[in-house]
Image (cartoon, rainbow, N blue to C red):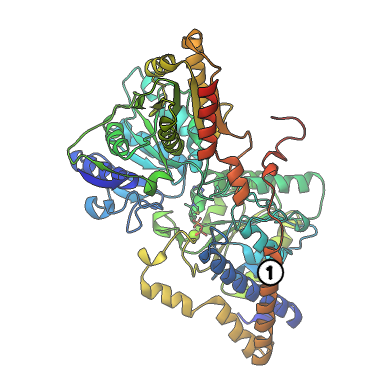
Amino acid sequence: MAEKTYLEAINLAIKEEMRRDDGVMVFGEDVGGEKGGVFGVTKELAAEFGDERVFNSPLGESEIAGLATGLGIMGHHAIAEFQFADYILPAVNQILSETAKMRYRTAGDYTAPIVMRAPYGGGVRGGFYHSQSTEKIFAGQPGLRIVTPSSVYDAKGLLKAAIRSEDPVLFYEHKKLYRAIKDDIPDEDYTVALDKAKIVKEGTDITVFSYGMMLQFVLKASEKLENQGISVEVVDLVSLYPLDQETIVQAARKTGKVLLVTEDTKEGSIMNNVSSVIAENALFDLDAPIKILAGPESPSMPYAKNLEDAFLVNQDDVLDAMVELAEF
Amino acid sequence: MDLKQSKLSNKEIIAAYKVIKETRKLDERLWQLNRIGKSTFNISGQGAEVGQVAMAMAFNSQEDYFLPYYRDMAAVMSFGTTAKDILMGSLGKKDDPASHGRQMPNHYGDKANNVISFSSTVTTQYPLATGIALALQVDKKPGAVLTVTGEGSTAQGDFHEALNFAGVKKLPVVFVIENNGYAISTPNDQEFGTDDLSSRAIGYGIQGRKVDGRDFAETYLAFKEAAEFAKAGGGSTLIVMDVDRLTAHSSDDDQRVYRDKAEIEEMKENDCILMMEEQLLDENILTIEELQEITTSIDQEIEQATLDAEAMPDPEASEIMTHIYETGGH
Ligand SMILES: Cc1ncc(C[n+]2csc(CCOP(=O)(O)OP(=O)(O)O)c2C)c(N)n1
Ligand SMILES: [Mg+2]
């Protein structure tokens, strides 16, 4: 066991996989050289593995995605970094038209076994274009996997699984968790399933689904409520697409009261998809309407402090929503 | 080149110098505000001010339009945005003309001066500029469009798509690449395989030029010609303007990690503003006393602008749901 941050766990996962598999390559804007990425996630990689396997790509995201996909076709488990999840947007065409459809359109003759990493999420005073949750843009595209770790343990194990996977995986990393969470994780090699939601806390009164920074708020609030006699089941989605429908429906049925928490805006969000899975499969087991706590339907997270605060779901909002649901 | 070879009057050259110096002093203030936590970000154009002002002087904010990028504070100030306006942007104030506190610092825009709103996603302003230019063309308006991006950002598809369309329609656009040698930590030879980005122009059927943005007169004359060419219906010009990036990429970066100490030091010794000040003295445009007076009065102006901007109101939380649709919405 060793104590690591979420960021260190990701860095370690890449290092270990690069040592295990010579074909793994890492590229993206500023990921190479001494800099090792704008957040430092790829620090020390160029020094250990050389500039051929770890390099700075030019500043073009469509190229980054296409390059990764081409390498993937040739059998390289490439790891592409998008500097911010906001800047994956120029690459959407490559990802949806090429990466996602490669296996299906060739009936498995060609595949794209690659990982595309993207730091997402707000609350960093990053304004419109350094705060967004763009995962919803890809959710609904069969052929792609979208996962996000919300603990240090998962950051390492899930990334290892993504690198070893023969499918293209969009790996969303919450930028606020990079240094905010630390945990002891095993020294031995382990992986975390790409397609399974996790019950991170068992409870009997309400079930709360979340991921990312919001999950931290949910966990804190559920501890508080436990002291007040409200027992909360907490589910970390892990896989944002495809959803782990079985675990989701079971956890919803267990308490009959469901709260979904996301920092994204509600309409079109991942949580809307979760809500539809629950409504379709467990409606008659519910004791309250499904509640979604989300950001306002406003175009993007603004910069000014009070506007950012107004956009972001916070700890109190989460606690209040949980109490309200429990009392329903 | 001598400053006077620009054919500008002494008065005009002094006015240009004042904007250049004011921008430097303002940027230094913005770094201070960042350090004490009053703004959370700063990205600056230190080392590019001389070129930017020489560039902007070839245009006027009555009939021309400007789509800048984040380093263009000096050019934006030339178009008429004030120090207080820019400070309000960095402090996220309600009356910030760029975005009313909605966008990060240095995301310029100012409708009163024809400076069009800028996003963080690099080079998206290039295709936008073609839309502005086509409107001028079909509406038979006299102006031209100036737009700028960094050299690394020319790797974006948007760069190529915009130049292509500008060539098709002979649009009145001056496209600028501010070449400071780095895209964050990535040097030019890892961004593109040519030593001369202005050669990109040929393939799109537009003009390509290179200027040394540390040379005020050379830069001004090149932009003047390109603006006149655009307005006369000749079409677009792509200008690569070499400048320095004296600071880190932004307040979130430390360039000492990836740049040699000697390289940074040499750049600082050849600071474009120091060079221009020498020229102002050598060409007897200003005396040393006059230079000092200008600096003193700029210091006072920045002090006052800071106090004024800080006293302005913040946006209200309820504004989060305003200006989303013409009517309706959630
Ligand atoms: C599409 C997109 N990808 C990535 C970024 C992150 N980013 C911001 S500035 C920058 C480097 C830009 O370099 P260059 O074009 O040379 O301009 P400079 O900052 O040097 O003036 C990067 C990668 C971005 N803003 N937009
Ligand atoms: Mg640059």
Task: Say what secondary structure mark 1 lies in.
Answer: helix
Q: Which residue is mark 1?
A: B307
Observer able to see residue A263: no
The image quadrant where one finds the C terminus of chain B is top right
Vertically, is B315 above or below A265?
below
- Describe residue B85's horizontal placement relative to residue A215 as left or right: right
> B228 or B288: nearer the eye?
B288
Depth order, front residue of B319/A257: A257
Provide residue A223's location: percent of width, then percent of height.
40, 34
Placement of B104 over or under A268, stated as above or below: below
Q: Which amino acid is tagged 1?
A: Leu
Residue A215: % across, % down: 43, 34
Q: Chain of mark 1?
A: B
Q: Position of residue A237 (x, y in %)?
A: 40, 27
Residue B70: name its quadrant: bottom right
Which residue is at a point 27% across and 51% down the rendered structure image?
A45
In this view, A220 is above or below A308: above
Question: How many numbered circles are shown?
Answer: 1
Quadrant location of residue A294? Answer: top right
Residue at (55, 20) in percent of width and height: A328
Give the crowd class for mark 1: few <14, some 14-19, many >=20 residues within 10 Å. Answer: few
Question: In screen coordinates, is B9 left or right of B88?
Answer: right
Quarter the N terminus of chain B occupies: bottom right
Q: Residue at x 50, y 7 (%)?
A: A284
Residue furthest top as drawn: A284
